[in-house]
Amino acid sequence: MKRKGLIYTWSLLQYGFIVDGKEIFFLHGSEILEGAEKATVGAKVEFEVGPPFPGKKYPKALKVVVGGTN
């Protein structure tokens, strides 16, 4: 199931977090399928959800499309 949210934090090292209501998801730049050049704080995204990395709290955002999807 596709989810929609906003990039809440973004690092020049190509990772950050997405918020969808009160839920938080980890985003790694390698999971961005479209719009990587638009990945900035506040950008709209559409994504799928995967399990968190072992020992981590937040689920992963997968198959992310940045911009123009919401």
Image (spheres, helix red, strand yellow):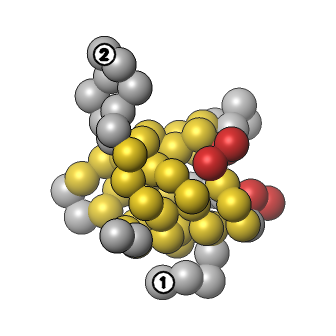
Instruction: Where is residue 8? Give x, y as percent.
Output: 45, 52
What's the amino acid at mark 2?
A: Gly
Is label 2 in contact with label 1 (beta carbons under 8 Å)?
no
Q: Say if residue 6 shows up in the picture.
A: no
Residue wearing tag 1 = 70
Which of pointers 2 and 1 lies earlier in the amino acid sequence?
2
Check the image and name the residue furthest to the left.
Answer: 22
Residue occupying image coordinates x 63% and y 75%: 67
Question: Is residue 68 left or right of 27 when viewed as pictured?
Answer: right
Check the image and name the residue furthest to the top.
Answer: 55
What's the amino acid at mark 1?
A: Asn
* Secondary structure of residue under mark 2: loop
Residue wearing tag 2 = 55
Q: Nearer the viewer, residue 1 or 18?
A: 1
Instruction: Where is residue 52? Give x, y as percent.
Output: 35, 33
Residue occupying image coordinates x 27% and y 28%: 57
Residue occupying image coordinates x 67% and y 44%: 29
Check the image and name the residue furthest to the right.
Answer: 37
Instruction: Where is residue 13? Give x, y as percent.
Output: 71, 31
Question: Is residue 38 left or right of 22 when viewed as pictured?
Answer: right
Q: Say if residue 11 shows up in the picture.
A: yes
Q: Nearer the viewer, residue 1 or 64?
A: 1
Question: Nearer the observer, disc 2 or disc 1?
Answer: 2
Q: Residues within 10 Å of mark 2 (few under 14, many from 20)?
A: few
Q: Which mark is residue 10?
A: none
Q: Nearer the viewer, residue 7 or 36?
A: 36
Question: Is residue 36 left or right of 17 when viewed as pictured?
Answer: right
